[in-house]
Image (cartoon, rainbow, N blue to C red):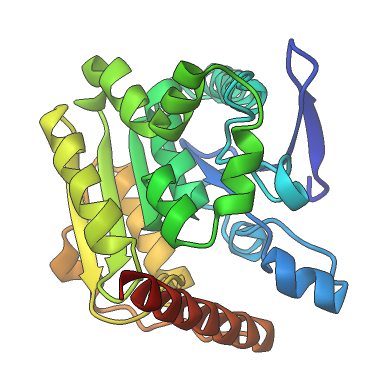
Amino acid sequence: MNQSSYFQSTKGAQIEYLIRDNDSQTTVFWFSAFTQGPRLGKILKSTPRFHGYRVSAENQEFNWVLIRDHAGFTNDGTYYGGTAGDLFIEDAVLELILSMKQKFTEKRVDARFISMGSSMCGYAAVKFAALGELGSGFVYSPHFDMKIAMHNCGRRPWIEWCLRSGTDSQKDEYLNRLQFVVDLKSDWISNIDLLVQATADDPYVYPEQVVPFIERFKAAGGTVELDLRERGGHTSIHTSNEYIYFVLSELSRGKLPKPELLGQFPQRKYSRTEKIEKTLQDFEHLVMKILKFLHIR
């Protein structure tokens, strides 16, 4: 099955997903953004695909469930939540995951489940690893803190859309949702093996978001490894297909890959549109730094 489908939750919300059933022991839930950013995609009038579409098409070692959140501002995601007053996306995604878990567990009594994603989708991968009680997580260039993402990572319109309804306490919980989920599911966190890949030059992500989250995740009893690279920015340049397959293979065997084993894989090559998008992102980050400097002065 290569065409996407829509899952309708009990509340009536729809989630777009794509499933590739290879009769495998391991099912990978890949939280998937558009393959091109909203700005560039609209300029080029391109047809968006799931992030992971080609990777999953070329690999039959795992079952794949690609899940997209395209609610919210510019239909480009709500951090897989919905709004502060109504977590309709989170509820729908969790229903879908539990349905898929039941489907694959009925086929394989030794079924394993892994969640993965990057940026906003890395946030979702950890959240649903806990909520859906999945065994492992693999995230790269992740956003873990909505407040920082809103104020420093250019995500203000997207997150403000999510805060347009709800009480003050609901909005506060939404902004701290991942922290809330980790605390809520602390009894399950000890069962999750998490691999985080980050780059030291990712503005407002590595020191401000990744480091404190890892500390909190460990404090809750989780096991985590950090694959830290010096350069790469907010990209997936270090996650080549070979890298992804190795990590998922290790996690499917119940092994958490050690960072010293992960440097052997070559970087993947940027497509032309990714090069343009990265240039736009770098320029945006430069402008943000200049504005922040001027504001401080």
Q: Is residue 39 left or right of residue 95?
A: right
Observer-nearest of 213 and 197? 213
**x, y percent for residue 210:** 26, 53
Q: Name which residue lies at 54% across and 78% down.
A: 284
Residue 224 lies, with reference to residue 153, above or below; the image says above
Residue 177 lies, with reference to residue 204, above or below; the image says above
Q: Is residue 65 visible?
A: no
- In which quadrant is the C terminus drawn? bottom left
Q: Is residue 220 visible?
A: yes
Q: Is residue 244 left or right of residue 211?
A: right
**x, y percent for residue 203:** 35, 70
**x, y percent for residue 224:** 19, 45
Quarter location, residue 267? bottom left
Q: Residue furthest right?
A: 45
Quarter location, residue 51? bottom right
Q: How many marks?
A: 0
Q: Is residue 8 left or right of residue 99?
A: right
Q: Name which residue lies at 56% across and 87% down.
A: 279
